[in-house]
Amino acid sequence: MEQLIGASAIALDDFDMTGHVRLHGERWNAVSDTPVKRGDELEVVRLEGLTVYVTPR
Protein backbone atom coordinates (compact mmCIF):
# COMPACT_ATOMS: atom_id res chain seq x y z
CA MET A 1 0.00 0.00 0.00
CA GLU A 2 2.91 2.40 0.58
CA GLN A 3 3.45 2.34 -3.19
CA LEU A 4 0.33 4.54 -3.47
CA ILE A 5 2.14 7.45 -1.78
CA GLY A 6 3.03 9.92 -4.52
CA ALA A 7 0.64 8.29 -7.00
CA SER A 8 -1.62 10.38 -9.21
CA ALA A 9 -5.38 10.36 -8.60
CA ILE A 10 -8.28 12.09 -10.40
CA ALA A 11 -11.12 13.76 -8.49
CA LEU A 12 -14.48 12.17 -9.31
CA ASP A 13 -16.49 15.03 -7.85
CA ASP A 14 -16.12 18.53 -6.41
CA PHE A 15 -15.38 18.46 -2.69
CA ASP A 16 -14.16 20.77 0.08
CA MET A 17 -12.82 18.19 2.50
CA THR A 18 -14.02 14.69 1.68
CA GLY A 19 -14.94 13.12 -1.62
CA HIS A 20 -13.91 10.40 -4.06
CA VAL A 21 -10.99 9.90 -6.43
CA ARG A 22 -10.04 7.40 -9.11
CA LEU A 23 -6.72 5.78 -8.19
CA HIS A 24 -5.22 2.84 -10.12
CA GLY A 25 -8.63 2.20 -11.71
CA GLU A 26 -10.47 2.04 -8.38
CA ARG A 27 -12.73 4.48 -6.53
CA TRP A 28 -11.26 5.63 -3.20
CA ASN A 29 -12.51 7.83 -0.37
CA ALA A 30 -10.35 10.95 -0.27
CA VAL A 31 -9.57 13.83 2.06
CA SER A 32 -8.06 17.15 0.97
CA ASP A 33 -7.13 20.29 2.92
CA THR A 34 -7.93 22.41 -0.13
CA PRO A 35 -11.08 22.53 -2.30
CA VAL A 36 -11.02 20.10 -5.22
CA LYS A 37 -12.89 20.24 -8.53
CA ARG A 38 -14.03 17.23 -10.53
CA GLY A 39 -11.28 16.19 -12.93
CA ASP A 40 -8.44 17.74 -10.91
CA GLU A 41 -5.21 15.76 -10.85
CA LEU A 42 -4.18 15.08 -7.28
CA GLU A 43 -1.21 13.48 -5.53
CA VAL A 44 -1.61 10.92 -2.76
CA VAL A 45 0.31 12.09 0.31
CA ARG A 46 -0.97 9.66 2.95
CA LEU A 47 -3.01 6.49 3.25
CA GLU A 48 -5.18 5.61 6.23
CA GLY A 49 -7.24 2.45 5.88
CA LEU A 50 -9.32 2.82 2.72
CA THR A 51 -8.97 6.60 2.65
CA VAL A 52 -6.30 8.50 0.76
CA TYR A 53 -5.18 12.01 1.67
CA VAL A 54 -4.54 14.09 -1.42
CA THR A 55 -3.14 17.44 -2.47
CA PRO A 56 -3.39 19.20 -5.85
CA ARG A 57 -0.44 18.59 -8.21
Image (cartoon, grey):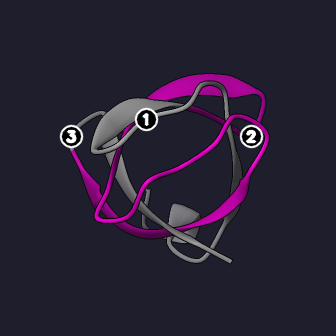
The circle on residue 53 is none
Labels 1 and 2 touching (C-beta < 8 A):
no
Q: Position of residue 32 (x, y in %)?
A: 35, 56
Q: Secondary structure at mark 3?
A: loop
Q: Quadrant of the C terminus?
A: bottom right
Q: Secondary structure at mark 2?
A: loop
Name the N-terminal-most of marks 1 and 3: 1
Name the N-terminal-most of marks 2 and 3: 2
* Label 2: how many Cα within 10 Å (few below 14, some 14–19, many 20+): few
Q: CA distance from mark 1 to mark 3?
A: 20 Å
At x 63%, y 43%, the residue is 37
Q: Which one is nearer the viewer's eye here, 49 or 40?
A: 40
* Magenta span of residues: 21-48
Viewer-side label of 1, 2? 1
The residue pinned by badge 1 equals: 15
Up/down of 26 relative to 42, above or below:
above
Q: Quadrant of the N terminus?
A: bottom left
* Label 3: how many Cα within 10 Å (few below 14, some 14–19, many 20+): few
Query: Across the whole image, how many numbered discs are drawn on residues?
Result: 3
Q: Position of residue 47 (x, y in %)?
A: 31, 57
Q: Position of residue 7 (x, y in %)?
A: 66, 67
In screen coordinates, is 41 left or right of 23? right
Q: CA distance from mark 1 to mark 2?
A: 20 Å
The residue type indicated by label 2 comes to His
Up/down of 20 relative to 47, above or below:
above
